[in-house]
Each structure stands twice: as structure tokens, then as C-alpha cells.
Image (cartoon, rainbow, N blue to C red):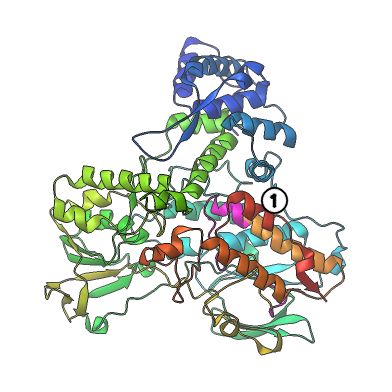
Amino acid sequence: MASVHALAVDGQDEAFIRRMLKQANMNVLRLALYQQTRDPELAAMEVATEGRDGSPFLFTRVRREHYDRIQEKALAYLLNAPRAAPPPTRAEAAAMMEMFLGKTLSVEHLEFGWEDLSFEGFARRACWEKKPAAEILGQYHVTIVGAGFSGLLAGIQLDLLGIPYRIIDRQAGIGGTWYLNDYPEARVDITSFIYQFKFEKDYPWKSHYATQAELQDYLAHIVDKYRLRDRIHLSTALQDARWDAEKAKWTLRVRHPDGRVETTDSDFVISASGLFSTPRLPDIPGIETFGGKMFHTTAWDHGYDYAGKRVAVIGTGSTGAQLVRGVAETAGSLTIYQRTPNWVNPTPGYRNPVSTELRWLLDNMPGYAAWYSYHHFTSQLQVEDLQILDPEWRANGGLINEKNDRLREDLKAYVRSKVGDDDELYAKLIPDYAPLSRRLVVDNDWYDTLLRDNVTLQTNGIARFTETGIIANDGTLENYDLVVLSAGFDVERYLWPVEYIGREGVTLKDLWEKDGARAHLTMTLPGFPNFAIMYGPNAGIVTGSFHSWIEVLSRYICGLITHTIEGDARSFEVRHEAYQSYNDRMDVALKAMLLEEEGGGGGYYINSFGRPGVSLPWTLEQWYALIRTPDCDEFRFE
């Protein structure tokens, strides 16, 4: 954190600070200031929930009549050459969270929030009950498959525990999906201030929604700060893994960059291969005959110059809708092939840089960064209410529930505000499914791009490719220089392309043949001892930061490993009855959500068996209670 001790108390500097404070989120500033001063006047200030523009979303703000007083107090504090107060205790932080939101919070929310605030460093760090000697730990080895955020985090946890490990990744660089996806306009659709590790949130983000290049810089920062680089082996692919019951180890066949295949043993394997690691190629007749340039968004050819060229983009999900803005500005013409329209969410400031004022507050106002992140986390929680079916509301003519129906109307109004009286285009852009039954797309000038003179939206479907272009179902032929495939990912192929063979020769195909990929609490599988998955089947929790959840998941997995070692056991394995019981409960809970009802909007949320295979039905509090620590009674330790 930058020091504020050098600030001079003179008219110019006071004016500068006043200007910075006027740009602050006043509730965040109030909490940061209270954390430093424990001023009871700040604690007594009331908050209110406010909506905007008919949206179902409400935002908690300190009442506006307190704004001037908060700013005056903050100015006095900052001009008084402050020294940051000691971090709050757990009990103090709990009281401050309730002060921030103006209501009583659940134990689970307070515990999760305490860990997210991370006032004492890595709050979700895995710990030993009684750490074994170094020579004992040196006898163990963990293989982590994947060098994205999850794999790097697993490495950090194991490093802190003192357990030897290595990270392998078949790609040539770190970052997982954020190495694979470097297409134009690639950036997160979650604010940077929660799309980060909670123990590493003082990073100087340049953008409110980090670009792919910024995320690569953040990942490099993590790798260097936590000394992971020597543990990472890139262009190194795990071909298969077989459980050896006699050794109680996994036998791995690993292909190195030079083509050499190594056979080695590992006590534990953590798969961090991720959900978005296997590109899906569209199955369109004649696609192999196309003579122009063609590539998938995950294999963008940055050496190909499409300036002034005829370009087609197939697919309008999150990736396709995100990239067309940049393509349209450069291409001579752009045709976008849309199979299914998406609900597109307006996101003010999506491409905005972090302002000078916000950067100054984050760097100079102690506690502001933590509470700013908490503000974004609590705002996101509202999404939970949008996905639950309301039988009474529907019996009275509603579609899903009151908030979801209001969101639908709000998004329809947004489309109309963009396309005006073009009824034909409007009709093409309105989905026939409920918002959030399919992933919401963030608006990166999607509608503005469609209105450009050089852009055409084709919704008639594709009949086949020719050597020169694409014939639509209505018989229209368009010739192209470049076709971009933006058909997304094959999310059903969990852990692909590695073949895992567990106890007594059981395979993933055997385990998942009934209705697709499943796991116990998304992480462990019966018949696969000493094996765990980071962000596995049905790991898509409705709310909460991805990074927060993988911190919790990594702690859980490392808890299984430490319990095995401390108990002088050789293996852990989830009991089949625990696996089955959990999945039965999950299936029942999913019935109360809109996913199956709406068929996932035809998207990847529903697998080929017709079952939700990506998302979880649990609220944040419910899911956190389930995975905060392992229930060792659900496992066999042998």
C-alpha cells in the first residue's frame, strides 16, 4: 500500500484529496474509515437499498445525507498523516459486514466474508493439525494437472504445507483458458476486483474488467511472488493415469516437450484442467472443403490480417458477442451467424480503465480495497434469487419468479433502446428462454456493432460450406476470406484428453455412463483414490467469486491430503454411498431452479443427457457449509 505520510497539509493537496474522495463509493469509504477510527458516528449512519431504471437489482448504499460528513471525516483522517490501524478481529469484521449491509447476516456469510476480506493474509490457507517432519513429507509427491488459476493455487497451498509437487500443462504458457483465449477484445465479464485471489487483491488493475493481457500479467505476478516457476512444466501432457493398488500410487505417463514419454509415480493427483479447456468445433457439412482462412477463437492467428476482408463469425455466445466489436472495426464486411439469441446484459464502463481517483483511494485509504471488493461480492449475491422457480407466481401467470420476469422485461427494453423501431432485428435478438437459464452475455457494444453498415446478422442457420463460403438454410451464398469459429467449448468432456483408470480398472466412462459427469461435492470420485478435481462437474455456483471458491476447494482437497498423511494412511477415497447421496440431493435441488425447466436455453448448462451438468443449486451459505472442511466420515482412509 502506498504511504499517505508524504501528503502536505496545504490548500493544493487538500483540494486534491477532496476531489479523490468525491469519487469514492461512500459506503465503502465509511467502512474503511470506521475500520481505522472506530468512530461511532460512522457506525450509526443508516443504509438504504436503492434500485434503478426498473431493474430487479437493488444496491445497498449509505444514505445520501451522510455523504458530506463521511468526506469531511475522511479528509481530516488523511490530512492527519495516518498510520493504518491493526486489522479488525473476526468479531469486529462481522459487525462491520452487518454495518455495511444494514442487516443481520448468517454465520456462513460472515465466515465466508471474513475469508474474502483476508485481513490477516491467506485466510483460506490449508493447515496441518500436527505437521510431520520434513523428511516424512519428502516421501510424498503430488501431481497437479493444469497451470491455470486453479492449478497455481493448488501449488501455493501445497508449497505452504511443505508437500512436494509439480504442475504440468500441455499448453506452452501459464493461465489455462486465459492463455488459450487471446482473441481480440478478450476480457473477463466479472469485475477485476473480485476476479482475483483474495489473498492477493492489492494488485494494481488497469481495467475494471481485466483484459486477457492484464490477466496474463497478474498470473505472472502470482507465479513469481509465490516462486512457482520452477515447479511448472509446460508443453508437458499427462497421457494417462492408472491407480496402482499395491503401491497406493498413481502411475502416470507424461509426454515431455521433446516427445519423450516418462512413466512415473505420484501419491496424489489433482486435476485442474478446467471447464473451458476443450474447444468445440461445429459439425457443419462441407466445412473441410472451405478454401479460405479458418480458425477457432482459441487458436487465433494473429499473423493473419483481415483488414478490409470478408469475415464470418459463427457463434454468438460470450466469446462471439465479445469479439465482433473489434473485428467489425477492421474487416471490410462481417456476417455473424446466430443460432440462438442471448440475453445481453448492459455493463456500464465495461472497457473503462480504473480511474486516477479510484486508484488513489485503493492505494492510499487503508481498508478501501478490502471493502470495495466486498461491495462487489455482496452486489453479486442477488443473482441467487433470479434462478428459483416460484410456483405461486407462475400459477398467477408469471414465467419464472417476479425478479427474473422483471429482468427479462428490463433486458427487452434495453434491446429496444438500441435497435429503435427495427422490429425485424428486434425479433431476431429476443430469446425465448428466461434470463440466466443460459449464461448472460456482457454487452461489449454487441448491439451497436449489429447496427454498423458493414455488419449483417444471419439467423437462417447454416446448410453447408462451399470452397468459397457458406450457404445458409434459405439458400443464400456468401463468400468469405476468413471464417472464425466461435462455437465455445465441449464442457461435458471433463478431464479430457487424459484417460484415468481407477481401482479395479474402473474408468470415467464407466462411472459417468448413466447421465454424464458427476462428483462428490464436485471434487472426488468413488473408485479413484487420492484423486481430486478442482472445479469439476456441477461446480458452477450461482454467486461468489470463482477465485474465492477455488480457494475453498483447494483447502478442502489439501485437507484430505493432510488427513491422509497425518493418519499414516496411504490413500483416501470417497465412499460410494456419500457420492450417491450428495448427487441425489443435488438433483432434487436442481428441480427447483429454472435450468431444466428452460432447457438451459439450448446452451452448455444442460448436458447431452438432459441434466444440468455445470451448475450447482446451492446458495452461497449452503455450498460454503458443505465444503468448508472435509467430512472425513464420507471417506475411507486406508
Q: In this view, does 447 lie above or below 481?
A: above
Residue under pointer 1: 124
State left or right for residue 103 relative to residue 210: right
- Give the quarter of the image for residue 288: bottom left
Residue 537: within the magenta?
yes
Position of residue 94 in the picture relative to residue 421 (left or right): right
Q: Quadrant of residue 332?
A: bottom left
Can the viewer see residue 89?
Answer: no
Residue 555: where, in percent of width, then height?
70, 58
- Return the x and y of residue 564 as percentages of the image width and height: 81, 69
User: Looking at the image, which residue is at 58% across and 43% down?
Assistant: 201
- Point 47% across, 70% down: residue: 491
Bounds of the magenta segment: 527-550
Q: Where is residue 407 in the image (x, y as percent from the top left)?
A: 37, 46
Along the viewing direction, whichever of 50 and 596 lies nearer the viewer: 596
Q: How many labels does the image show?
A: 1
Q: In which quarter of the image is the C terminus?
A: bottom right
- Relative to residue 638, is residue 221 depicted above or below? above
The residue closer to the viewer here, 585 or 600, is 585
